[in-house]
Amino acid sequence: MEKPVVRAAVVQAAPVLFDTPATFAKLENLVREAAGQGADIAVFPEAFVGGYPKGLDFGARLGMRSAEGRDAYRRYFESAIEIPGPECALIGEMARSSRMHLVIGIIERSGGTLYCTALMFGPDGRLLGKHRKLMPTALERIVWGQGDGSTLTVVDSGIGRIGSVICWENYMPLLRTAMYAQGVEIYCAPTVDDRETWLPTMRMIALEGRCFVLSAGQYLSRTDCPQSFSELLDGEPPAVLIRGGSCIVDPLGNVLLAPDFDGPSVRVAELDRRMLARGKYDLDVVGHYARPDVFALSVNTAAQVPVKFEPVPPV
């Protein structure tokens, strides 16, 4: 039986850049703080574990890479985590001990490639699903691989159907449609986009999908970064590199939590699940408001692997 009213937290914070053990200590405290406010679900920002080193170019120029950039990437690579792995198990234990659903942005290491990934955990500590960012934006493509359709994931839970779409993926209309078609009810949008235009985007998605939208953004200051980070940047970095802007919107576009740009925070809003049906009354873009005779979307959900080993046929 799903809860009629869900308490949802958006966590606006940043990791300790290039220090994954310190980040996990910070994560544990933030999970505890959200649980202390009675949250049923807590959403963390994009790249919370592993970090979003805003401003770094990793020594990349057209046709050129620098030794310093390669070493910066090495540090970033070592900050990432593997799925499954011991760090993933630690996050699951935090979800279990807090009895909360957790949605958390990580940098995932798989072989020699990094992915910007969102993990979704249940209150029993199980990893319910993951989503790899399909389209890294601009210079992100230097350090992140592309996800595929196998992780366009919406999962069942005791508080509703949960899905994650990361940062500028939210500007991909067909990706959003694929999420709506899976019945997403709690649409999580971990991000590092701290612009004024982010809230209108989240309101539009809530209205379009008739779902709750929970967006958690990083609040990254220079004190979250080692001194060597500043040395890799061109010029003196600002005191605040990412200023937050986390928000929650209901299925009719009402802002339940307005963007916060004042600093780190853990804020909670109540989601009245009755709003889901009220919203679908006059708009269901993959149901009664669709025109499949005119428009159709095909989604390839097969995992894309670069090397396939075929079995040797019997002699």
Image (spheres, rainbow, N blue to C red):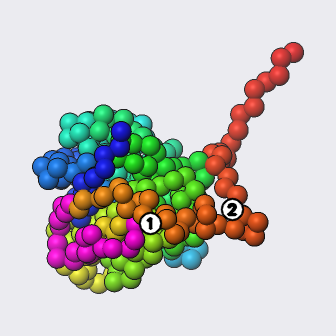
Q: Residue at x 53, y 59 (%)?
A: 180
Pinpoint residue 61: horizontal percent, then vertical percent.
Answer: 51, 76
One can see residue 60 in this view: no
Q: Residue at x 31, y 35 (%)?
A: 125
Quadrant in the rendering for residue 285:
bottom right
Quarter the C terminus occupies: top right
* Relative to 37, 84 lies left or right: right
Quarter the N terminus occupies: top left
Pinpoint residue 110: horizontal percent, then vertical percent.
Answer: 49, 45
Category of crowding for the residue at label 2, using alpha-carbon neighbours closer than 10 angstroms: few (below 14), some (14–19), many (at least 20): few
Q: Which residue is mark 2?
A: 297
Q: Which residues are magenta?
A: 251-268
Pinpoint residue 215: horizontal percent, then vertical percent.
Answer: 34, 65
Residue that protrudes farthest toward the right in the picture: 315
Which is more N-terminal, label 2 or label 1? 1
Quadrant in the rendering for residue 95:
top left
In the image, which disc is placed on residue 63? none
- Tell me the amino acid under the disc marked 1: Gly
- Above or below, comparing residue 132 to residue 64 in the picture: above
Which is nearer the eye, 275 or 74? 275
Which is nearer the eye, 287 or 51? 287
- Tell me the amino acid under the disc marked 2: Leu
Q: Residue at x 36, y 35 (%)?
A: 126
Category of crowding for the residue at label 1, using alpha-carbon neighbours closer than 10 angstroms: few (below 14), some (14–19), many (at least 20): many
Quadrant in the rendering for residue 314:
top right
* Relative to 182, 311 lies left or right: right
- Above or below, comparing residue 71 to residue 193 in the picture: above
In the image, which disc is placed on residue 279? 1
